[in-house]
Image (cartoon, grey):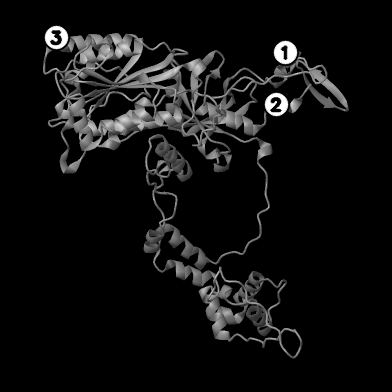
Amino acid sequence: MAEWNAYYKNEDDEEDEEEGEKSGGDYKTTGRDSLVFLVDASKEMFIKGEDGEPSNFDMTMQVVRSVYTSKIINSHRDLVALVFYGTEQSKNPRNSFKHVYVYHDLDEPGAKRVQDVDALRGGKGAQLAAKTMGSGETSLGDALWCCANLYSDIKLRLSQKRLMIFTCRDEPHGGDSVKDRQARTKASDLKETGVTIDLMHLMKPGGFNVASFFRDIVSPPEDESELGLQLEPCVKLEDLQKRVRAKEQRKRAMARLNLCLGEGINVAVGIYATAVTARKQAPVRLYRETNEPVRSKTRTFHTQTGSLLLPSEIKKAQVYSKKQIVMEKDEVDAIKKFDDPGMFLIGFKPMEKLKRHHHIRPAVFLYPEEDEVKGSACLFSALLTKCSERNVFALCRCIARRNYPPRFVALVPQKEEVDEGKVQITPPGFNVIYLPFADDIRTLDPPQCPVASQIQVDKMKEIVSKLRFKYRYDAFENPVIQQHYRNLEALALDMMAPEDMEDLIMPKVDQIDGRLGPLVEEFKDLVYPFNYNPDSKPAAKRKTAGTGGGAEKKPKVEMPEEELRAHMQNGTLGKLTVAVLKEACKQFGVRTTGTKKQELIDALTEHFAHSKFWSIL
């Protein structure tokens, strides 16, 4: 029979399981995500910007490549397609549509596709695009119809269908009302089949007027958290990448629960992970002959008869008082179950009651699920507003999943923030802080260390103030993981060598030295003795020839009174040796309880602080 701990998972296993769920992606239940890039191939897209800035077409290809590589790393089973419209040449299934060029069908991304996109970048890429596709008439309606056929040819289950239009022309048909009406009709048909249409409009001379045509083409935001239609066009590559990333990333809930505010008052909420630890993907075992992934199966056999055991024949057992207690799986599940999954509001507490040491594990984010229970967004928004106004957090009991133990959590309100481009930086909602139990908080005996003088503390404060900078969590990448994926990319794309990578976590020594100047040496003079070198080894003791190895006695070192007084005023007694401090204590009649250096310094300081001689000085 299986032991009890074989059924109960430890906390580390649960955390690994949660991190796997945070990365999102059980394709058996949710299906695959799909994304179609519909790119304008007109001549206006190839015009370079001022001061050598890349053209709109070049920026679009860089964004497409970035999405391809991120899909390969994070979710390689997603489907991606690249379609050009407004081309001279035509290439699409059955060649039913003119001036539409399907560069990549809706399929999983791979190294070959990344190489194809790389060929379209830069000046040579523009020449290759002009030679391969060219620029001709534009019919956005035919392009949308072609994209609809790409979706209809897919027999897989898709959880998300998204289409992104990249263009710098606000009137692609030049005022042709027939083509405009056809495009609006096809866009409406696509939206009825569940396809979300987004516009990534780029800069053009005179500005981009979204209201003239594309307002009726794009899909409205699904909820308040969804990034709505941007009125300002993208000027820089960073702005375009940020908008595409905000639209392309799928917001998958770790769990969907009911937040019970009282009897009969439930709010449907979803728990989301705002940040997940980046890790290398686990290796995949391949069959050596066919190079296909190997799937492992586990079966349980009887130890005596060797017969195959069914799941119903396997029982759980635990030994108590030398007796084996056998229980059915249903009984074990009943023991583990505390209550149904959900959140129960206990009360409210001032924000001052929430301490920094209460943060024991990564926080998650709470957001309403309007589709589950109507009115959840309204009630959730009212609760968020009142908690922010009164500066309080909500204390709740949380059970995230079935058979999970209950935890006490603090719901900390968070207001929405947007940047200059109206891109949402911080979404509105509650940060869920997991609180420790009383047994988790223990009193520790800190080690006894020497206490720094006020002069030393002030000098270190000055050093810290010089080295301060505004920290951004996204400004530092893991160099090991970055180098790992660069090596894989170079191997897959047949590159001569991986791209150079800058290790951003290494300290910038020259910049630090320029900011500090002489402060480091001044701090060393206050803390360490004269000519102190931490790398040097202590000198070996010399043996005298006459005594046959006995150590030579050193003469007593007397400290002049004025010199000792100067050391005490400057706080540099620590630079003196223990022998000198001991001799000073004997010289001035100072009694000490210990022989350590810090104890001698404290005894001398206390003696002179209370003596009449020191008070007169």
In the image, 271: left or right of 139?
right
Which residue is at the front of the view, 272 or 202?
Answer: 202
Amino acid at circle 3: Val
Question: Which circle, 1 or 2, is nearer the viewer?
Answer: 1
- Give neighbour class at mark 2: few <14, some 14-19, many 20+ (Cα, 10 Å): few
- Give neighbour class at mark 3: few <14, some 14-19, many 20+ (Cα, 10 Å): few
Amino acid at circle 2: Tyr
Q: Quote the CA–CA distance across marks 1 and 3.
A: 67 Å
Label 1 residue SS: loop
Q: Where is residue 34 in the image (x, y as percent from the top left)?
A: 38, 19
Find residue 130 and report its image quarter.
Answer: top left
Say whether disc 3 or disc 2 marks the residue closer to the N-terminus: 2
Label count reads 3
Is residue 245 visible from the viewing direction of this image? no
In this view, which residue lies farthest toward the front? Answer: 289
- Residue at label 1? 310
Find residue 487 and report its image quarter.
Answer: top left
Q: Which mark is residue 178?
A: 3
Label 2 residue SS: loop
Q: Which mark is residue 8?
A: 2
Say whether disc 1 or disc 2 marks the residue closer to the N-terminus: 2
Rendered position, 218 above or below 17 = above
In this view, which residue lies farthest toward the bottom? Answer: 546
Which residue is at the front of the view, 439 or 386?
Answer: 439
Label 3 residue SS: helix
Say whether disc 1 or disc 3 marks the residue closer to the N-terminus: 3
Rendered position, 142 above or below 297 = above
Question: Which circle, 1 or 3, is nearer the viewer?
Answer: 1
Amino acid at circle 1: Leu
